[in-house]
Amino acid sequence: MSAAAACVPMLAPPAALSSSSSSSHHHHHHRPAEAELNKASGTRVVQDEATVEAESVERAGVDDDVISSRPRAVVQTLTCERKQIADGFALWRSIGRPELPDLDPFLSFDEFEFSPPAGFPDHPHRGFESVTYMLEGGLSYHDFSGHKGTINKGDVQWMTAGRGVVHAEMPGGEGVQRGISIWVNLSAKDKITSHQKKKTFPFSQRAINTVACLLLIRCAVPCNTSRVEPKYQEMASDVIPVAEKDDGVSVKVIAGDCLGTSSPLRPRTPAMCLDVTLQPGAALRQPVPRGWSACAYVLAGEAVFAGSTAAAAAARTLVVFGGDGDCVEVRGGAGEGARVLLVAARPHGEAVARDGPFVMNTAEEVEQAREDYRRRRNGFEMADGWTSDHATALTSNSRNQKIRNE
């Protein structure tokens, strides 16, 4: 689903839960202690969609010959409490709360549960990627391009909203549906199309283009011409690669690399996402590129994280790692072991302005996104006249109920 398999942002933006969804938030990001972008680390910035489709972007732990020897220390620990947001919908929020508004590029991180009548009818997004990983039950979705289906227990959907998408997300069945929802920010170049990045020239743009074509040269003035369209990457539970160690470690490699096993999923923002199961006392030392933000959410049991001092964390606890170190080390607790979702990603280091379903770099761009959606343009054209199957069913059910009550 989207950062809301739970569609959380439609009810509360991925800032503090107490924030108003109608106000725009504009700020710089929280970064791990001592973290710096390592521009000499061999990372590669993908410049266009074709490159993303054809090649791998920067990946975590890809060089298995490099021995990771300095575990990152835990610099923040957050216990997550259940909050009822609406009838049939609740969440445990870790990133996107006052103590941790964001962790560049992560905008929100929620464990959610919802059941009928809760649901998220047709709504827009722009400017980020959303990750939905189902832990129990399922999530049904339908977007304005006709893409629809259901992701079930153990399945993952990694959606790139890019310049615009409109979709609906609803419970995939009766009873409680539970999962993880993460919003990952996109860089400025992956949010906005060329007409939004207007440049001022001393001559008319038409004249400049004419001269450029005649001389067969490119205009020397930099401009953003990328058009990042919505993209879905989905994997069923039984096809997500699994890496194992004989001492009691099993890892579902959702994104990135672990123990020599790679995921075929390619996030637009270079990222790693691992579902790690540890038997009591079993340990995993996972490489994480220097400069990347990293955190871990304990799904079950108790996990012990190495670093300057060992830190233990129980279920529904998020630990944030500092930037000083080249790996993360986690061990299963002595009782029942642990299940941990380890995520990391390369930060953008850019200003963020967000309001509800739109995440941009400036307040003006957020307002432009809203205007584009209202006018059904610049990425939202397919929303004109479109209604999801879910919204149609809700309307029909409401009409039938009204008739029965008359």
Image (cartoon, grey):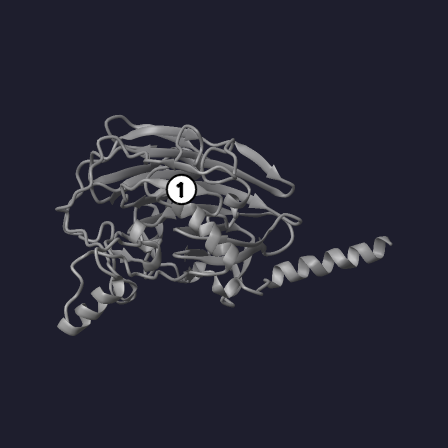
The residue positioned 67% from the left and 49% from the top of the image is: 117
The residue labelled by disc 1 is 363
- Residue 402: x and y in percent read 80, 54
Q: Which residue lies furthest to the top in this view?
A: 309
**Foreground residue, 150 or 105?**
105
* Left/right of residue 66 with respect to residue 355 in the rendered view: left
Under circle 1, the secondary element is helix
Q: Is residue 245 visible?
A: no
Residue found 46% across the figure and 61% down from its top: 377
Q: Specify whether 393 is left or right of 101.
A: right
Q: In this view, does 75 lie to the left or right of 154?
A: left
Quadrant including the C terminus: bottom right
Visible residue check, residue 403: yes
Say which residue appears at 41% left-offset and 28% top-offset.
Answer: 99
Based on the displayed image, in which of its 4 quarters is residue 108 positioned? top left
**Which x, y percent locates residue 191?**
35, 53
The three-letter code of the residue at mark 1 reads Ala
Left or right: 308, with 115 as reference point: left
Residue 54, position as x, y percentages in the image: 26, 67
Farthest residue toward the right?
406
Q: Which of 63 and 132 is in front in this view?
A: 132
| Residue 386: percent from left, percent from top | 57, 65
Badge 1 density bin: few <14, some 14–19, many ≥20, Cα 10 Å: some
Q: Nearer the viewer, residue 47 or 317?
A: 47
Which quadrant holds residue 57? bottom left
User: 76 above or below 377?
Assistant: above
